[in-house]
Amino acid sequence: MPAYAIMGVVNVTPDSFADGGTFEEPDAAIRHARRLVEEGAAIVDVGGESTRPGAAPVPAADELRRVIPVVEGIAALGLEAQISVDTMKLAVAEAAVDAGATYVNDVTAFRHQPELAGLVADRGLDCCLMHMLGEPRTMQEDPRYDDVVSDVKAFLEERLAAAVAAGVAEERVQLDPGIGFGKTLEHNLELLRRLDEIAAIGRPVVLGTSRKSFIGRLTGRDVAGRVHGTVATCVIGLERGARVFRVHDVAAVADGLAVAAATLAPHGP
Ligand code: HH2
């Protein structure tokens, strides 16, 4: 794996917090994926269910209808990028894999449907297991930890072990602290500050800070104005050991990471 990879977000939803409704039409989503790859994304992450705070679950039939034509369309382009499906549902992941996805990004870390681990194992897929406290509908209601970094780390170690026990090859697993998923502003900053402790688990760390509300809290910007703050979090994240950056603004983050990576490793990539 190269020093880092950018995962571009393709939300095929009416209600995602950052870009809901913008890419609801399959053609618009497919064009957007092509653009993100041209801008430097090595992975495109296609999702049909918003997990923003307060979001209601989406029935599998709706998620399938949103996601599958887009995965098929992106696969048909033959881009130099891996297709990821952002879902917690076995039926959606299975259909997406049949359509060309080779990466499963599950924000419940195989807790919603443990059978998802079997699919990842059987098909030899890559996966991302993310930490979330509670569920999207209620996760931002007074989240508490003993020590947020130790708690998230213990959770990710447990989910990694569960995935391996279900037959997933350890080298296929990436881990994500779940920025914004049941976390206060201070929890998010503490996780970012001490991300090296999560990286010490020994699996690639995925970081999803893009345009999130804690950046808005710090800068006073609305969602569209959070790109500079997002770049700052990615640069810090790279320095603290993150390897995959899940972002909406690929071109800006690619520039920031290129400069940061050259500075951190002056003798070559
Ligand atoms: N964040 C979101 C969704 N999926 N997956 C991972 N691995 N890490 C994240 O931080 C993460 C994620 C939320 O962002 P977005 O998809 O833009 O919004 P929404 O959930 O409203 O569609």
Image: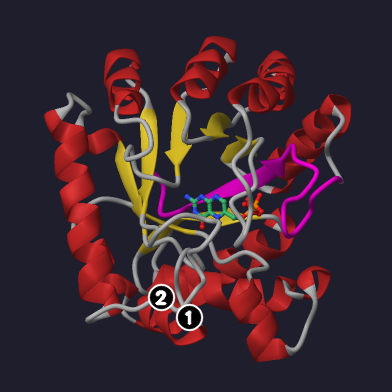
Give the residue at mark 2.
143
Quadrant housing the N terminus: top left
Q: Amino acid at mark 2?
A: Pro
Q: Quadrant of residue 144?
A: bottom left
Q: Amino acid at mark 1?
A: Thr
Q: Judge by depth and name the residue closer to the eye, 129 or 135.
A: 135
Image point 79% across, 53% down: which residue? 19
Residue extent of the magenta highlight: 1-21
User: Does the stretch in magenta take in 120?
Assistant: no
Image point 87% across, 30% down: which residue? 25
Q: CA distance from mark 2 to mark 1?
A: 7 Å
Which mark is on residue 51? Answer: none
The chief SS type of the magenta part is loop
Image point 79% across, 50% down: which residue? 20
- Residue 76's place in the image compared with 24, above or below, is above
Residue 45: image x %, image y %?
A: 59, 39
